[in-house]
Image: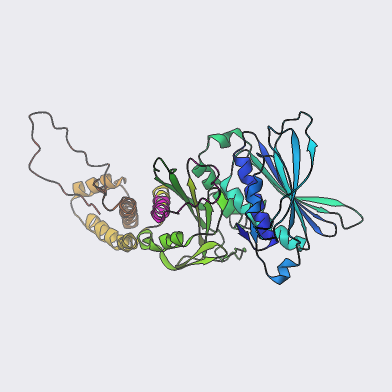
Amino acid sequence: MEVSSVPKLCQRLISSAIQRCRISDDFCRLSVVLKRSPLVRISISDTGVGSCLEDFQDWKFTMDSVSAEKWDGVISVTTTSISDNEIFQYCLNLKESTSARRLIKLPSNPKNGAKFSGTEVSLSSFENIDDLLVEIAHFLRKMQVLKIPKVAIELVVEHCDSPISRSEKFILANECIPQSFLSSNLERLRSGFEDYVYKHGNSLDKRCHSCFPTWEHLKVGSGMAHRAGSRSSSDLVTEAVIVISESSEPSCACFRAYGAKTEVLYFKDFLLCSIPQSSLNALASIDWKSYGLTLRTVVEQDGHAILEWESLPSCAHIDIVLHFYQKQVILPLAGQKTQVDRNLIKNAVKLALGDLKEKHPGALLSTRALKIRSYAPDLARTIAALILSSNNSNFQEECFSLLGLPSQEIRGEIVECCITGKIVSVVETNDRKPSKSAEAAPFLFEDCFHEPDIQEGEYEDEETYSTLDL
């Protein structure tokens, strides 16, 4: 594994700590502590299972000359497993070549019969503590999208370079609640991503009340695509969550990392990763126009896929998260690579789009449905005029009854508005159904027509009735 800077190394160390917590059978705490005195002392500790030291020996550290001066390459590792009687300490220089790298074992400490496990990795650097804090905080913010149960995360900054030592706790995320154990990965991903969107992806502890004064401004859809594995391979799963947020203030100038563009977070095996080219291709190949969206560009930036849309309303914003993992493998084996399935990514996104449309009528209508819906007012006006211009009172009363309107004091605007609503509803309902569905489309007045019961030996009348079926 190759890292190119101290912040990137910290992110990798945090990811490893989270994985150790995931496979633990108990509640775990992950603590990231930055201490300035005068160097920045970085400590990343967890109470998960003991670490595998071979993993650190395979890491490669490559950086430019400016970055290389900020860190000597040395990390200190303190670790113990639940079955160990000692706490082991090691020292390792990651700047050395992997072939010449030596793991230096330091004196260990006895546990005196105590039963616990955990790992702490620490290093010192000349990094700017404020810049380092921002990068680590944003990384933790994104990792919280997964809402991994049983893991509490905290980020602490200790200032020891002034006469008065002080400590600031910037983030504390606690998912150690029994309800989270009963939730599926997809349910936790959905909940965590909603929280991420409410905070515009950059706030640590407060949602944006300017854009979201209530919790009713999000349209959310989720989907999961699955491919069964063989005897020699695990099942592959891709989860997707899509959120459309509609700001209450169309001119809201709140900071977003990529402005009006869509940021696609990509997780693989419960780790935040750079999105692979195959997934970029899968996103580009989706028929977005069938969901009323026109994709202008899809590019990779900062490890994320960035989608740019055409004609997206200024008050609307789209966010997407993808999670690809092996269902039966918790930690990947050393050197093991899993090929991301392009079709799984594509199908999961399409299922999430369909789920969003189903739950929010009128959202993501196809270009065809939008065109048909635009004719609804004119068609409704024509039908209303035909009803109201009739001299047959029985005919009018029957029409009003079908529309669910009282027959007295009916005005043209009311009839027209009612018919428009029914037409639009039918168009939106039909657009949510798969194009190859064999199910009959709904009637405009579906509650008003009932087929007679046909008893054995009876036959339907030959006369047929037509209904407006859009």
Residue 399 is situated, as x and y percent measured from the top left of the image, at 24, 48
Q: Residue furthest front?
A: 100
Q: Considering the image in quadrants, where does the N terminus appear? A: bottom right
Q: Residue at x 68, y 32 (%)?
A: 83
Quarter of the picture containing the C terminus is bottom left
- On the rendered structure, is 267 left or right of 281? right
Q: Is residue 41 left or right of residue 216?
A: right
The one nearer the camera, 300 or 316, is 300
Q: State the residue at coordinates (49%, 47%).
A: 325
Query: x and y percent of residue 370 in the render?
Result: 34, 61
Residues 142 and 95: in front is 95
What residue range appears in magenta?
328-354
Whether residue 315 can be seen here: no
State the image coordinates of residue 122 (x, y, percent, origin top left). Answer: 75, 51
Q: Give the image quarter of residue 371.
A: bottom left
Front-most of residues 137 and 466: 137
Relative to the observer, which residue lies in front, 444 or 216? 216
Q: Is residue 374 left or right of residue 314?
A: left
Q: Residue 309 in the image: state x and y as whole percent.
A: 46, 67
